[in-house]
Every structure is written in structure tokens, then in C-alpha cells.
Image: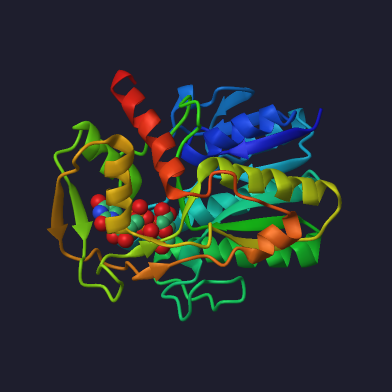
Amino acid sequence: MIEILVTGGAGYIGSHMISSLVDAGYKVVTLDNLYSGFRDAVIAGEFVEGDLSDRHLLEQLFSEHSFAGVMHFAAHIEVGESVRNPAKYYRNNFTNAQNLLDTMVEHGVNRFIFSSTAAIFGEPSYIPIDELHQKRPINPYGRSKRMVEQLLADYDRAYGLKSIALRYFNAAGADPLARLGERHDPETHLIPLVLQAASGRREHISIFGSDYDTADGTCIRDYIHVVDLCQVHLLALQALLEGKGSNRYNLGNGQGYSVREVIDTAEKVTQRKIPVIQSERREGDPARLVADSRRVRLELGWKPRYGDLETIIAHAWKWEQKMPSK
Ligand code: UFG
């Protein structure tokens, strides 16, 4: 059986990935420090609690297993926090990633799938954003991810480490069976917050800015179902296992929805009125972020299964309704 190491497997995207990997017939080991993940989200495979700063632990893990590849999800993800506390972001997102990659090189493990982000592009100069778009991240979060992408290019040239960087736009939705879902603490993402307002766990949803240069004045984002995202990881892993070279892909549905449209769709899906408050703009929010995902469709043969916003929100809503019992 092909064995894969998943770092951050107790987190939102990592936990869905483990389920997809196991369903696809892989053997999985999760490494997670449970800083922001949940032990009960790891529903299959072996679990190791530990931190990527622990070189001794990494050494031991790679000696005991023969991993065919590594999927790296473990990272901090809050843009605002990265501005206030850049040390935390560079240490975890960059230095710890380097620890992992150095251990891989030492043990001859040379296939790496990296969770990158739309934040590496910064303020877009055109939409939709393709892979060639200039990379000028505007916050430490985006810079820490960009730096790993640069390191990966150098490690390929020098050590032959093959990697695929996947730049997520807005990951959303949940396992269709609601075994897993989004559980950040604190939650900062739009769709779970809107659904918490629908279920009554939150009094209202604040719209951060209604004076953007968009049709209804609110920001536009490209939401991609977490299960579709995992499907791309499987295809990327397959490509590396077949001996294909390093690559990078932008991952979205290629269709933007405004904050207002997300709230309207959530009202339709939940059949509930969602209380809304108009607030100030949130610092660092570009008006529009939409992916040009033609390359991943063409080269990896990816087809989104849950491309429409209503399905994404319906699955997230199923999960939200399970949440109070968690
Ligand atoms: N928003 C609100 N109210 C809220 C929360 C969000 O109006 O309570 C708005 C935001 O201003 C933004 C949109 O909803 O316009 C989406 O916001 P999210 O926080 O859900 O997602 P972001 O687009 O800010 O973040 C995503 C990823 C990050 C990544 C970033 C890149 O989740 O990891 O894109 O810019 F860094």
C-alpha cells in the first residue's frame, strides 16, 4: 500500500483529505500538533501528535515509515494575525515547512503537495488570476507561503524534490455526509459565520464593506468545495507518482460570488432570515479574487463535482446543524 504523510490532518482541509486518501486506497499517517485541529476530525489512518519544529520526531517518523509522498496542510491561516505577529507565521509556515522538507530530502522522499494560497498574488492586476499573474503578497501570511513556493523551486533544482503547489482561493463546504466540516476557532470565514447567524449561534453577520467597486458593493470571492479541492490533491499526487515534474495550480471554480450573494444563497438554502449588519471594510481585502483554473482542468483533468454555490452552502449547513452537539 502506498503510504502518505499528511501534516495538519486534524484541520479543516487536512481532515477531508485523509478521508479522500483512505477512500482512494492510500495508507495515511497524520501529523498534527492539535494547535488548531481536532483529534476527532482524523477519522482514519494513524495519528501522531507532534510539531514540525521537532526535528527529532520528524527523523523518527521518516525512519519508521516509507512515505511515497507528503501533503502539507499544517499552517497558520489568519491574514490579520500575520500582520500583528509575523514571527509566528514565518516560524510555522516557513521555518517548520523547511524542517519537513529537509527531513524529506535526507530520507529520499521526493514528492510534496503544498497548500498554497491566493494570498501570494496580493492585489490582483487582472481577473481571473492565472498562474502567470505577478506575485506580490501584501501580508506576512501570503509572503510566508510565497517563500515556501520559492524554496520548493530551489529544492527541485538542487535535490530533485518534486512538488505541486496548490493555490487555494476560498475553500468552503463540508463532507456531504457531514462527518467533517469547518471548525476554526475563532471562525473568521464568511460561509460558516453566515450559517452560524442562520442557526442562531451568532446574532448576525457583519458585511465588511458595501462600497467596493462591484455590482452590489460587496467583495467577490471564488468559493471551491473542500471535497473538490481534495480531488485535485489526489490528481496531483497521482501525477507525481507517475513521474511528472513540479508544478503549481490556481484552484477555484472560476466564478465569483459577492458577500451579498453568499448571504442570499444561504437564506435560500436554510430557509431562514439571516440578520445582517453593514460594517467597515476589513483591512487588506481586495474587491475581487477569482481564479483562472483552466490549467488544472487541462493538465490534471480536474472537473469540479460540487461547483455551484448552493451545494457548497447546503453541505456546510448540514455540518453547522450538527455542530451544537460537538
Ligand atoms: N466577510 C464579511 N464578513 C465576515 C467575514 C468575511 O463580510 O464576517 C467577507 C470578507 O471581507 C471577504 C469575504 O467575506 O470579502 C470572504 O472572507 P473570508 O474571510 O471567508 O475569506 P478571505 O477571502 O478573506 O480569505 C481567503 C482564505 C485565506 C487567504 C485569503 C487570501 O480563507 O486563507 O483568501 O486573500 F489568505
Q: Name which residue lies at 59% across and 37% down.
A: 17
What number of labels is visible?
0
Residue 151 position, x and y percent, is: 64, 64
Q: Quadrant of residue 183?
A: top left
Mark yes or no: residue 152 visible. no
Protein image colouring = rainbow
Residue projecting furthest to the top: 325
Give the camera-side residue of 153 and 23. Answer: 23
Q: Quadrant of residue 207?
A: bottom left
Give the camera-side residue of 192 and 312. Answer: 312
In the image, taking residue 244 as reference, residue 179 lies left or right, namely: left
In the image, taking residue 139 as reference, residue 279 lies left or right, namely: left
Q: Name which residue lies at 63% across and 58% down.
A: 165
In the image, taking residue 17 as reference, residue 84 lies left or right, namely: left
Residue 188 position, x and y percent, is: 30, 48
Q: Is residue 84 above or below residue 213?
A: above
Residue 212 position, x and y percent, is: 26, 73
Q: Is residue 280 above or below residue 320?
A: below
**Which quarter of the figure is the N terminus placed in?**
top right
Residue 69 position, x and y percent, is: 74, 42
Residue projecting furthest to the right: 243
Quadrant hosting ligand 1: bottom left
**Which quarter of the figure is the C terminus placed in?**
top left
Mark yes or no: residue 144 visible. yes
Give the camera-side residue of 154 and 185. Answer: 185
Residue projecting furthest to the bottom: 125
Q: Name which residue lies at 52% across and 43% down.
A: 226
Q: Name which residue lies at 45% across and 41% down.
A: 311
In the image, taking residue 235 as reference, residue 293 lies left or right, namely: left
